[in-house]
Image (cartoon, grey):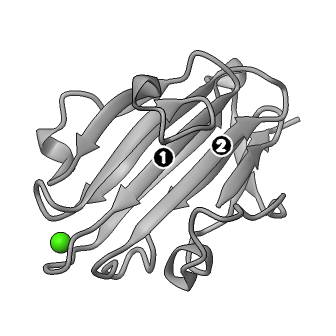
Amino acid sequence: MDYQIPDCGSVLVESPNYPNNYRNLESCQWLLRTEALTPIRITILDFDTEEEYDRILIGNGANPSNSASQIAGPLSGSLENFDRTVFTSNGDRMWITFTTDDNKVKQGFSIQVEDAGCVGKNMMAFLHNKIFLSIGFNNRSTCMGTSVWSSYRAAS
Ligand SMILES: [Ca+2]
């Protein structure tokens, strides 16, 4: 899924089927960018995956295959064991990948992705349209069909 974060807005990136269990052999990718070209701040709100085997990676830019761009991960297991739950990009684009192995599933995760240029402002929820779908990397319906797509913007 590719998400564009509205000016002063945010989106929620969730594992497939969240808050129900994800499936085995998931391979998901989210590409994120801000409309305002400001950095992105992501906050892990909830996280529970099979330790070591079901994991996410987070990076700067729009190319998850570039390992030099990775800034966090692999993250797996429970949220309470993480040293950090907030990560900020160095530019207006960020990526998240999620892969699982062939056995043991858990609830997964919910991650808030915000326009870092507006963090701290009062925000209210509203629905936002999906901008465009990712192409090529992942056509699995488990990733495409279940990601929650909601966002927030500053209250006027
Ligand atoms: Ca697993």
x and y, in percent, of residue 66 in the image:
48, 33
Numbered disc 1: secondary structure: strand
Q: Residue furthest top?
A: 90
Please report the residue visible at 65 percent of the width from the left and 50 percent of the height from the top.
Answer: 11
Q: Which mark is residue 67?
A: none
Q: Position of residue 134 (x, y in %)?
A: 70, 61
CA gap, disc 1 and disc 2: 8 Å
Closer to the chain start, of discs 1 and 2, is 2
Query: Disc 2 residue type?
Result: Leu
Q: Residues within 10 Å of mark 1 (few under 14, many from 20)?
A: many
Above or below residue 61? Residue 55 is below
Label 2: element kind? strand
Task: Looking at this view, name the residue that lies furthest to the right.
Answer: 156
Q: Quadrant of residue 68?
A: top left
Q: Residue at x 50, y 41 (%)?
A: 64
Q: Is residue 82 above or below residue 130?
A: above
Q: Quadrant of residue 39?
A: top right
Where is the C terminus found, in terms of image quarters?
A: top right
Q: Which residue is mark 1?
A: 96
Residues at badges 1 and 2 in contact (C-beta under 8 Å)? yes
154 w.r.t. 117: above or below: below
Q: Which residue bears the numbered disc 2? A: 32
In which quadrant will I find the N terminus?
bottom right
Q: Ligand 1 is in which quadrant of the figure?
A: bottom left
Q: How many marks?
A: 2
Dot 2 alpha-carbon crowd within 10 angstroms: few under 14, some 14 to 19, many 20 or more? many
Q: Residue at x 63, y 47 (%)?
A: 31
31 or 9, nearer to the observer: 31
